[in-house]
Image (cartoon, grey):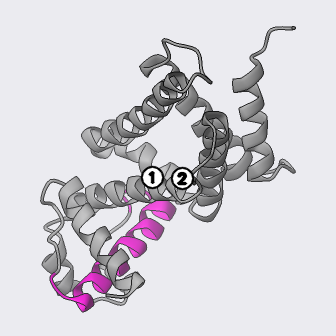
């Protein structure tokens, strides 16, 4: 199986699992491509219009898919939205994971993961609107998105402490604080724009704050 086919398969199955059965996993390569088109079109439509103004017919037109085919993959617009949140959460995870490699220290891992997220957000600014809307459209998906990210950060903090580079006792509280910082620097420097700082520069600044704190030394 090619890399494209493998990626499509993972997306299809991952979305179906994360959406608790709301997405119907296609069994063919053509079906996986259609599912991908629907998710990509939904990201554009929800990102531009919001959940309530978007329609299934406009999403299928964007995707170049027959309206009737939509229901082969989703039972409703709500089901598509839940699957899209799961899909975007997975993309956020893989974008960060792809920037990491063996031999990185704990601080370097945090810098690289944030820089990768910022680059992803720069290319997919709609992720902010869609995740924010999930708080009201599907609170369970919204909460799962952030709880999953915080859990990954907490695991990295504990691993850094176990390796002797981070102080002991770091965990959930610090993970949520770091995630909040990452989300809002992304909003300020990537989504809103207007600041001449690259994702790498922003990530380096945040990394310096983690390493040095704010107290005069």
Estimate the x, y position of residue 97 in percent, counting from the top left: 50, 54
How far apart in space, not on screen, are marks 1 and 2 (Cα)?
A: 5 Å
Instruction: Name the quarter where the N terminus is drawn.
Output: bottom left
Q: Main secondary structure of the magenta part?
A: helix
Inspect this view and state whether residue 187 appears. Answer: no
Q: Residues within 10 Å of mark 2 (few under 14, many from 20)?
A: many
Point out which mark residue 183 bears.
none
- Contact between marks 1 and 2 (CB within 8 A): the answer is yes
Estimate the x, y position of residue 81 in percent, counting from the top left: 30, 59
Asked whether, in this view, residue 130 is left or right of residue 211, the answer is left
| Range of residues picked out in magenta | 27-53
Q: Secondary structure at mark 2?
A: helix
Judge by depth and name the residue closer to the eye, 191 or 117.
Answer: 117
Give yes or no for residue 31 being in the magenta stretch: yes
Q: Relative to residue 51, is residue 208 depicted above or below?
A: above
Q: Which residue is mark 1?
A: 93
Judge by depth and name the residue closer to the eye, 104 or 170.
Answer: 104
Give yes or no for residue 177 being in the magenta stretch: no
Point out which mark residue 96 bears.
2
Asked whether, in this view, residue 9 is left or right of residue 4, the answer is left
Estimate the x, y position of residue 139 in percent, counting from the top left: 28, 38
Q: Quadrant of residue 184?
A: top right
């Amino acid at each position: 199986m090619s890399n494209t086919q493998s990626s499509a398969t993972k997306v299809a199955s991952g979305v179906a699992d994360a959406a608790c059965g709301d997405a119907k996993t296609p069994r063919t390569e053509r079906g996986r491509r259609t599912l991908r088109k629907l998710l990509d079109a939904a990201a554009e439509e929800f990102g531009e219009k919001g959940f309530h103004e978007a329609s299934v017919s406009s999403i299928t037109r964007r995707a170049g898919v027959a309206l009737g085919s939509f229901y082969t993959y989703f039972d409703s617009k709500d089901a598509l939205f839940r699957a899209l949140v799961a899909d975007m959460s997975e993309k956020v995870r893989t974008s960060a994971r792809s920037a990491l490699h063996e031999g990185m220290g704990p601080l370097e891992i945090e810098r690289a993961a944030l820089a990768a997220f910022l680059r992803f957000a720069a290319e997919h600014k709609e992720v902010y609107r869609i995740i924010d809307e999930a708080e009201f459209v599907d609170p369970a998906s919204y909460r799962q998105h952030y709880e999953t990210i915080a859990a990954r950060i907490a695991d990295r903090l504990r691993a850094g402490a176990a390796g002797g580079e981070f102080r002991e006792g770091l965990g959930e509280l610090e993970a949520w604080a770091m995630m909040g910082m990452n989300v809002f620097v992304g909003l300020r420097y990537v989504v809103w724009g207007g600041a001449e700082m690259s994702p790498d520069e922003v990530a380096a600044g945040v990394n310096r704050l983690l390493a040095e704190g704010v107290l005069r030394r």
